[in-house]
Each structure stands twice: as structure tokens, then as C-alpha cells.
Image (cartoon, rainbow, N blue to C red):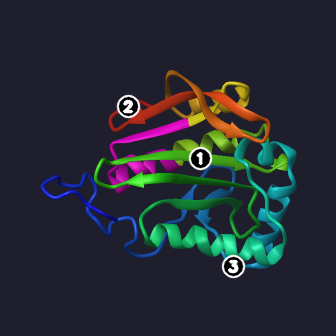
Amino acid sequence: MIFSPGIPAVVPEGRLAAGDQPVLPLAAGLELRPWLPTDADADALLTAGQDPAISHWNLFSVGGRAEARARIERLRARRRTETGAVWAIAPVGGAPVGLAGLNDVDLVAGTAEVVYWVLPEARGSGVAVRAARRLSGWALDDLGLHRLTLCHSTANPASCRVAEKAGFTFEGTQRSALLHADGWHDQHLHARVAGDPV
């Protein structure tokens, strides 16, 4: 993490990487937990990489179990370098049904972007909303970030509903800001700041 001289960080360096990544309980027997270098977690990433919706909206693919395991290690390394933090959405003691995380973490500015995807069997159950709400609450209240964004293609109304239900205020449309497999998309920008009601 590079800090600008004379500008105090909103979140002190080392705070995101300190200790173990927390497990964040969700309702309905689910939790946000760290991704693990196990066959079950690698297989969940493989399944996600083969899902047309996840691949389309996230430019996400995984070539095999070895690549999935390497990706899990990169996810874990991002927290150690304080550039991101990513959790598996999983039943307690079970295999992941989705992912939720913080991208583009900037501890100096106190900002990050919330990202997520959910496997087909968990869609429509509200799990994405619960995960985005719980993760953003932790990021703002416990980690101490000031502002979170959540962005999605204007052609993805399901993500718009998730953002709104998770307490993110719609702030506008950014033109040709998001690259997908079929080209550049306009994107909606939603944000949640410390102190916003949920």
C-alpha cells in the first residue's frame, strides 16, 4: 500500500491484513467466509466460470481445478496486500454458492467497490442482497471505510435490485464504462457511505 505524504489514511495501513479474515454470519444458515484451498471451493469457482451469466457479467472464466486453486491463492493474497478482500458465500460448513468482496480498496481514501456473484442454485433467494448488505456493513462499521460503490451494467436489472435492497443509493449512469464479452456497456453507479441508513 502506497500512502501519500502528509495525507492521513482513513483506515490505518495494516488494518485490513491484520489477523485472520473474519467470518461474517448471514441469515438462513449462510456465512461469508474466506475462500479455502480445497476441492469443494475450487469446484465452486469452476462451476462459476462455466455459468453463462457469471461469465458474461464478470468476464470470469476458470480453466480447471489447478487454475481455480491458483485463483483462490490470489484472492487470499489480495487481502494481505490490502488491495481487496473476497469471501465465499456458503452454508455453514458447506461449499460456496457465491462470492462477495471488496475490490479496488484504497485505505487512504477510505473507499472500495463491492462485487458479488451467485451460482444458479442460490439465485432468487435474496442471498446476494444479504451478502452485499452484511459485507458493506462490516466494511463501513468495522473496517472503517468511508464510501463503497457498487456498479453494474445497465442491461443487468437484477444487480440494480440487489444494490437498492442492500442500501446503495443510485447516483447515475456512467457511459461506456464497463467492458463485457459483447463490448462496452453503460453502467449504473450506486454508493453507500458511512452513516447511511440501511
Whether 38 is among the magenta residues is no
- 152 left or right, relative to 68: left
- Residue closest to the eye, 35 or 126: 35
Instruction: Tell me whether the residue at label 1 lies in contact with that at label 3, contact meaning CB atoms closer than 8 angstroms.
Output: no
Which is more toward the observer, 196 or 76?
A: 76
The answer, for residue 164, to whether it is visible in the render is no
Q: Earlier in the sequence, mark 1 or mark 3?
A: 3
Question: What label sits on residue 37 in the rendered view?
Answer: 3
Front one among 3 and 118: 3
Q: CA distance from mark 1 to mark 3?
A: 21 Å
Q: Mark 1: which amino acid?
A: Val
Q: Quadrant of the N terminus?
A: bottom left
Magenta region includes residue 143: yes
Q: Look at the numbered disc 1 and give the secondary structure of its residue.
A: strand
Can you name the residue that lies furthest to the top here?
Answer: 172
Q: Which residues are magenta?
A: 135-150
Using the numbered discs, state the Cα–Cα distance from disc 1 to disc 2 in whole angstroms.
19 Å
Residue 48: quarter of image: bottom right
Residue found at x 51% / y 50%: 135
Query: Where residue 26 sits in the image (x, y, percent)?
Result: 60, 52
Measured as percent of width and height from the top left, residue 95 is found at: 77, 66
Mark 2 highlights which residue? 196
| Residue at image mark 1 | 115
Question: Residue visible at 78% across and 47% down?
Answer: 54
